Amino acid sequence: MRWSVVDSPIGDLSLAVDEAGLCRLHFGRADRPLETDPLLTETQEQLKAYFAGELQEFTVPLSVRGGSEFERAVWAQLCRIPYGEMQTYGEVAKIVGDVGAARAVGTACNRNPIAVVMPCHRVVGAGGKMVGFGGGIPLKRHLLELEARIALETLWT
């Protein structure tokens, strides 16, 4: 894996790519040697555009490593949640085929290896309650507010 760090409005984001695509995006600065790579550069540019409100869908290829069959189904569903919208843990559980697995969806979101790009921040508790997020609730709120603002601005123009 080749690593890089991008500065963002929510702090440093550490990125890793392999031969197939983006395979890690973590909050904070990775304690790894940093490298340059065209895919890392493209990911950095897309993240900057996302935070500037200029990008609503990431197009960098993903290389999802590991995870159980259930976790991989949850991660795939995360990528289907539209920009500016949310689903509850229970809704995601139902979509992936296990209506009683809301807590397991939360665990899968917590294990999401590619935060922001695989948008686990779009998954909320029942009734829209702001619960659980690996980067912390303030970061989750920031990402959701950014997307809601941009989605409304886009709708009104």
Image (cartoon, rainbow, N blue to C red):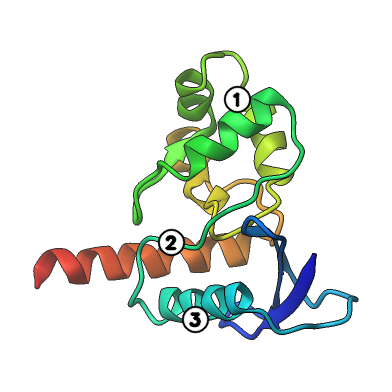
Query: Which residue is disc 3 drawn over?
Result: 45
Q: Residue at x 66, y 52 (%)?
A: 133
Name the one closer to the observer, 131 or 84.
84
Mark 2 or mark 3, which is nearer the start of the sequence? 3
Asked if residue 6 lies left or right of residue 28, the reply is left
| Res. 56 mark | none
Image: 58 above or below 120: below
Q: Amino acid at mark 2?
A: Thr
Is any atom of residue 125 visible in this view? no
Crowd class of label 3 (few under 14; some 14 to 19; many from 20; radius 10 Å): few
Q: Residue at x 56, y 14 (%)?
A: 98
Find residue 21 and report its horizontal and vertical position in percent: 62, 59
Mark 1 or mark 2, which is nearer the start of the sequence? 2
Q: CA distance from mark 2 to mark 1?
A: 28 Å
Find residue 10 and report its horizontal and vertical position in percent: 61, 77
Image: 44 above or below 72: below
Mark 3 residue element: helix
Find residue 48 and report its horizontal and vertical position in percent: 49, 81
Q: CA distance from mark 3 to mark 2?
A: 11 Å
Q: Residue at x 56, y 60 (%)?
A: 116
Crowd class of label 1 (few under 14; some 14 to 19; many from 20; radius 10 Å): some
Q: Are marks 2 and 1 in contact (CB under 8 Å)?
A: no
Query: Which residue is disc 2 drawn over?
Result: 59
Crowd class of label 2 (few under 14; some 14 to 19; many from 20; radius 10 Å): few
Query: Which residue is disc 1 drawn over?
Result: 102
Q: Quadrant of residue 139?
A: bottom right
Mark 1 residue element: helix
